[in-house]
Amino acid sequence: MSRPQIAHLDMDTFFVSVERVLDPRLLGRPVVIGADPRGRGVLCATSYEARKFGVHAAMPVAWARHRLPPETAWLRPTPEAYSAYSTAIHELLRQDLPAVHQTSIDEFDLDLSGCETLLGDLHDYGQRIQKTVRKEFGLPSTFGLSTNRLVSKIAVGTAKPYGSIEIPAGHEASFLAPLPVERLPGVGKTTRKRLLELGIHTVGDLAACSLQTLQTALGSNGILLNERARGIDRAPRPDAFSPRRRSSISRDVTLPRDSEDPTLLRTHLSQLVESGCQELRTLRCTARTITVRIRYSDFITRSRSSTRASTDIDLEIFDTSRTLLENLIDRRVRIRLIGIRLSNLQSRDEGLLDFQDSWSCWKRVLHATDRITQRHGPRTVRFGRSLIGESRPDPCDLFSPPKRSPQ
């Protein structure tokens, strides 16, 4: 039986790269995605140019604002575009490979075991994948290959950006040994601190540490980390990868200022519903469960859910969401954040639209507007209720180029 060969393909700065494909004017500039520079919240993605200034994802906007130069492009996320490109890349990979597993929106595991006769040298094949993705979509990626998913994923982290790497069988432990111990999955801040107290700084130190010492310090997790440090991945081999199936779609927004204005709150809720429903239709799904979440200015967070007939129609989901929001607000405290979650997703055949029911007209309208927004941007066509209370243009619109969807 041939030795397993598991590859990991990671799209480099995926959100930023998609925005740059859609607007080449962003090339070479620091780019941050996730918030209004004059607002609040945190960043969800940054370009390598921005990271040179010490800015990274999950950093509060207020901190990043004072570190970045004036030419920085501040963008609101366009999840519909990211989802469309992710789906297109997945479909491209599955043309050659039946065993493709999407682990996140921008990461893919490929089981290449026994495929040498069909694909040739597997490392060369990985580089061909990178070139194809770059040619078809204009997106850079990094490729890693080893005998298991754990080592391949870690290897990709050492080869970024835009690189490729192969760890030959039998060299897993020696490759991992010099890396900082926090590079291992499962080593967070607390575990790292405990390991440093034991004098363990590198993965090699962890691999050489006695199991008794690790078990005393970390319990059963210590045994697991020792195996990972030696390049052993106990996760079942993905003999039959399946396409990644989304379990939910989430959207949230931190308000520019804490508010209790019901009109403004409904405006933001409508915008979240529009974005979530567009992604539902892109994924060819409908949702049965709708959850609305709010966070008060004192950071108390509450949520309510409702399960109903499955739908992807904005008006139906908004009506339910609005009722949930009204029932949630039971304190005389301003609200800081609103979010929605669409879950209990069910697949829907895009080609079988029922134009005979009571929503037939809206289905035609929504599918037409989806095509417009995929080409020209998520804020090209809006419901009127999503514009109420907007007193000034969004400053991020200065950097919102015409959008196109992957062909």
Image (cartoon, grey):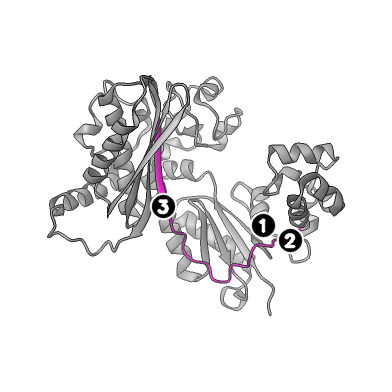
Foreground mark, 2 or 3, reads 2
The stretch drawn in magenta includes residue 248: yes
Q: Which residue appears at 74% of the width and 40% of the height?
A: 192
Residue at the disc numbered 2: 232
Between the residue at mark 2 and the residue at mark 3, the CA separation in whole angstroms equals 33 Å
Depth check, front residue: 200 or 48: 200
Task: Name the residue located 63 percent from the left edge and 66 percent from the top edge.
Answer: 236
Which region shows up in magenta?
Answer: 231-254
Position of the C terminus, as image quadrant, is bottom left
Compared with 97, 302 (above or below) is: above
The local secondary structure at tag 2 comes to: loop
In the picture, measured across the screen, residue 330 lies left or right of residue 41, that is left
Label 1 element class: helix
Instruction: Residue type at mark 3: give it.
Output: Tyr
Give the spatial CA distance, label 1 vs label 2: 8 Å
Amino acid type, label 1: Leu
Between marks 1 and 3 in the image, the one whose residue lies nearer the viewer: 1
Name the quadrant of the N terminus. bottom right
Q: Which mark is residue 150?
A: 1
Secondary-structure class at tag 3: helix
Q: Which residue is mark 3?
A: 85
Q: Residue at x 49, y 54 (%)?
A: 134
Side (left or right) of 319 relative to 227:
left
Q: Position of residue 168 (x, y in %)?
A: 73, 64
Report, in whole angstroms, how far the alpha carbon at label 1 lies from the one at label 3.
Answer: 25 Å
- Residue 336 position in % (x across, y down): 41, 25
Circle 1 Cα neighbour tier, 10 Å, few/some/many (<14 / 14–19 / ≥20): many
